[in-house]
Amino acid sequence: MAEQAAEHRARRLWRAVEPYHAVVYFAPESQAACTDLGTRGYWMSYFALRAAPLGAAPPEVIAALFYGFAPRLVARAVPDTWKVASPERFLAVRLEAVDAALHRLLGGDVLRSAEMAEAADLAREAALAAPTAGRALGAANAALPWPEPPHLVLWHAQTVLREQRGDGHVAALLTAELDPVESLALFAADIAMDGGWMRTRRGWSDDEWAAGVDRLVDRGLLGADATLTAPGRAVRAAVEERTDTLADAAVAALGDARAARLTELVEPVVRAIVAGDGFMRDNPMGLAPLPTVTTPA
């Protein structure tokens, strides 16, 4: 309980709502829809769906903004993906796929409920309050037209909020002088994630990963056995603290009580998504959904 109480409110809201957004990457409807368009493999659809708000961006821009991915992994998918379909078509497909996934996972009654409408209104207010100056992915998603059904309003709002948060996280990593490989290796060590799995997931070679670990050892952030040192833990804490601070304006616009209400509203929805395998439990974000909310009698 003490650990939960100390958690920054921006982090708590992100953990609460992010699995609702993540169905676009983890539920099968998105992959199936992109395959029908003509994409090949998971990463081609991933980069198309996530980067589409930027327009037909080249791989160099996408790799720069997404930060953690090896440029060659991006280049294997982009720009070929824009030959399959336009960014505008992928934007339509991702909303259609999310709509289908949420209907399957939650059912029409939940999607049409008063609770869903309330959650959508709160999330939209937070997203509209999120600053986008200097935040390319957040701004690109914020510039898109809002969908109409409340369940898609909630999804779009969280998309804006999570990309805006991610832009701030990249700024925090740059301030900490952590390059993409170093940031991933330090993160994996911090949360006891398999570094080899993370390396593979983000497309880096063994040599690139080993060189990044060596740089962290030289800085004293990892020990000789690649475990996190006290200075490394401090750098990780500073990065996450800055990320939360830079994401806080949206939560401040709601206020603590209404942010807590949004968390309460999405909890049973996210629980159903996780139970329906619409969310990858072992994910590269290291994200664990919030535990079940209990309301005092």
Image (cartoon, rainbow, N blue to C red):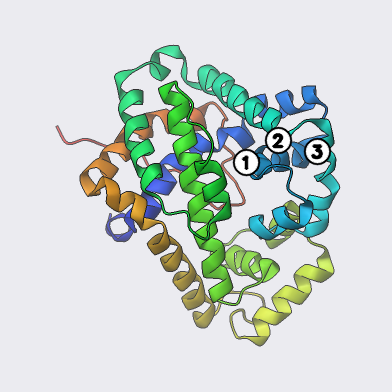
Given the image, on which type of amino acid does mark 1 rest? Pro
Tell me the residue at 32%/54% (across/down).
9
Q: Which residue in the protein does label 1 denote? A: 53
Q: Which residue in the protein does label 3 denote? A: 81
Tell me the residue at 27%/45% (across/down).
254
Q: Quadrant of residue 185?
A: bottom right
- Mark whose residue sits in front, 2 or 3: 2
Between the C-alphas of marks 2 and 3, the distance is 9 Å
Where is residue 78? Give x, y as percent: 81, 46
> Sequence-wise, which precedes: disc 2 or disc 1?
1
Q: Which residue in the protein does label 2 denote? A: 87
> Sequence-wise, which precedes: disc 2 or disc 3?
3
Between the C-alphas of marks 2 and 1, the distance is 7 Å
Work out whether residue 261 can be spotted: yes
Q: With 249 as the anchor, is 206 left or right in this view?
A: right
Q: How crowded is mark 2: few (under 14 residues within 10 Å), some or many (20 or more)?
A: many
Given the image, on which type of amino acid does mark 2 rest? Pro
Kindly indicate whether the residue at mark 3 contacts the one at mark 2 (C-beta within 8 angstroms): no
Which quadrant of the rendered structure holds the N terminus?
Answer: bottom left
> Sequence-wise, which precedes: disc 3 or disc 1?
1
Where is residue 188? Give x, y as percent: 61, 63
